[in-house]
Image (spheres, grey):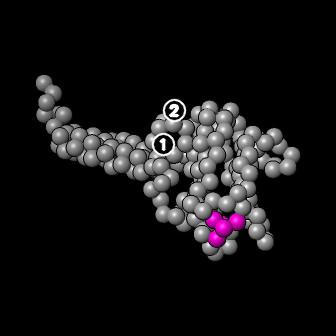
Amino acid sequence: MIKQAIQAGALALVFAAGLYSGTAAAHGRVAMEEDTCMRRLGDNSMVHLSAYQPQHEPSDQYCTDIPKEGNTFLVVDLVDPALRDIPVGMRIVRGTSEQEDETVSYVRPSHHPDGVMRGETTLDKGQYTVFITGESVPPVHYQYPLRVQMINYAKTFRAAVWPLIGMLLLTFLGYRIMQSKRVRQWRSSRRP
């Protein structure tokens, strides 16, 4: 009976770990419609932002939550082919206002026939906003908030919920097993 309880507990723990690892997956594993790094204007006009810090984690890509300070490479994929035919630029500001806050990096509007706009900047701890502007009629305007080396408590809570539920379930299961008649009978038969 105890062996079965241990096996059930181990199975529940593996299940909870599987759920937990799924919530921590990189943003590249989701459908385009659900990707938080995708911005859409109207039905067709879309861009996708990826941020890289190869000096810290060479293969990881980020979007709005940048884990560490330092050199950051920003790559904007112009998903909409029409954006490749107009000048598109990028401005990164400390804060949230394009006009009032300090510009930390600027990529002049130009044509990007390959559909990729690249920029590099050094980001310190704090909040930033990336503004992507296409010079067309009417102008297209996208923005991404960036949080550099800041804790996102909502995301942390969401990631911790499933393991917590799994542990509570294991605790409840263990309690029920320990209170079962067979376990009590087994304990009483072992007493001298």
- Residue under pointer 1: 60
- Residue under pointer 2: 56
**Outermost top residue:** 192
Extent of the magenta region: 82-86
Say above or below: 168 vs 46. above
Q: Amino acid at mark 2?
A: His
Q: Amino acid at mark 1?
A: Asp
Q: Main secondary structure of the magenta part?
A: helix
Q: Residues within 10 Å of mark 1 (few under 14, many from 20)?
A: few
Image coords of residue 13 (percent x, y)? 33, 43
Q: Nearer the viewer, residue 18 or 89?
A: 89
Residue at 70% from the left image edge and 57% from the top image edge = 110
Image coords of residue 41 (percent x, y)? 68, 68
Quadrant of the image containing the N terminus: top left
CA gap between label 2 and label 1 equals: 9 Å
111 on left or right of 9:
right
Number of numbered labels in the structure image: 2
Residue at 61% from the left image edge and 34% from the top image edge = 71
Image coords of residue 75 (percent x, y)? 59, 50
Quadrant of the image containing the C terminus: top left
Say which element carries label 1.
Answer: loop
Residue 157 appears in the rendering: no
Image coords of residue 30 (percent x, y)? 47, 59
108 on left or right of 147:
right
Q: Residues within 10 Å of mark 2 (few under 14, many from 20)?
A: few
